[in-house]
Amino acid sequence: MTVVGPLGLSVRDQALEAEVQAGLTAVEEGLLEATKSEVSFITEAAQHLVHAGGKRFRPLIVMLSAQFGDPFAPGVVPAAVVVELTHLATLYHDDVMDEADVRRGVDSANSRWGNSVAVLTGDFLFARASHILADLGPEAVRIQAEAFERLVTGQILETAGPRDGRDPVEHYLDVLAGKTGSLIAVSGRLGAMMAGADETVVDILTQYGERLGIAFQLADDVLDIASDSGESGKTPGTDLREGIPTLPVLRLRERVRRLGLADDVALSELLDSDLSDDARLREALDRLRAHPSLEHARRDTLRYAEAARAVLAPLPDCAAKNTLLDLCDAVVHRAG
């Protein structure tokens, strides 16, 4: 079987594999067309991350969800292009906020052209996504607008931090539901909806996307600590260096509050210090990789992947359902 989509996923059914491959090829063509501008510099900047590749996780969810209706319906591929354009736009903005130097194994747009160009390019991609979306009907526009509101709200909540008395882990999971889960939920919803699937099926695939999206981001949290650049496509420890408290760090702080062990306290203090120095960042990464909090974060990833798996139970057994189940396993393996 040919590997398709993200995570090295192999589709076990040849007919489904062919349809998914054809759909993703059409999405790729749509992305290139949507990122063209009469201004050559805008085209170069807008296609920077398109050419860098990526998992195309959201378009894959669209394609698989469309299998529960008519996968060849005219709105399916445009919907996949919309969700990927929206995702790409957020990456340009995220890299500015994180001051990231690398994205998908290439120079980030902000490091190459500066923050202003990166932000404006993200805005350009949002505009192009909206243009395509307008042809999919007012319901699709409303769904995307609600998801975008949730996405931005999640980003703001992350920036603001938890309110006094709020459990930091619960707050963080709410952030992920907005920042990541919302758009992957829309991928399932629009894929099924554009294919004309039953409303019950649309709802199931929406829930699946949200839960899998959270698991996917938790796996990213683990990878930011446990992987090297070749695996994750970005500089290891980027979140640590920027002081972004991802789940392994939050689990460490939770353990400090609960047990107060000297080694845990020392590691927490190191993580809270200035990690702009490469040697200190390397020490922090090495110590966190060996700490139980990283394994705790892996278990959290497994829990959300299993929740995504469970919500699929009412769907009829078919190749698309099996592949969606395989995605749950692939996310867990990625964090392993």
Image (cartoon, helix red, strand yellow):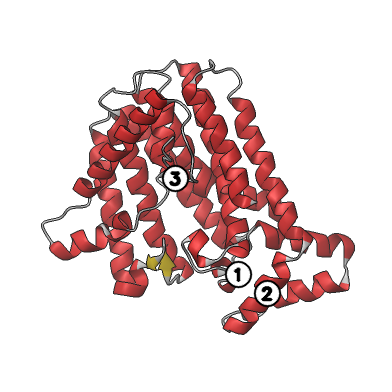
As drawn, 8 above or below 51: above
What amino acid type is highlighted by mark number 2? Ala
User: What's the CA distance linking mark 2 and mark 1?
Assistant: 8 Å
Q: Are marks 2 and 1 in contact (CB under 8 Å)?
A: yes
User: What's the CA distance linking mark 3 and mark 1?
Assistant: 27 Å
Residue occupying the point 34% across, 37% down? 80
Q: Which residue is mark 1?
A: 240
**Number of marks drawn:** 3
User: What's the CA distance linking mark 3 and mark 2?
Assistant: 35 Å
Q: State the SS at label 3.
A: helix
What amino acid type is highlighted by mark number 1? Leu
Q: Is residue 271 left or right of residue 10?
A: right
Q: Nearer the viewer, mark 3 or mark 1?
A: 1
> Looking at the picture, how far across and down is residue 137, in whole percent?
28, 28
Q: Is residue 180 visible?
A: yes
Is tag 3's residue or tag 2's residue first in the polypeptide sequence? 3
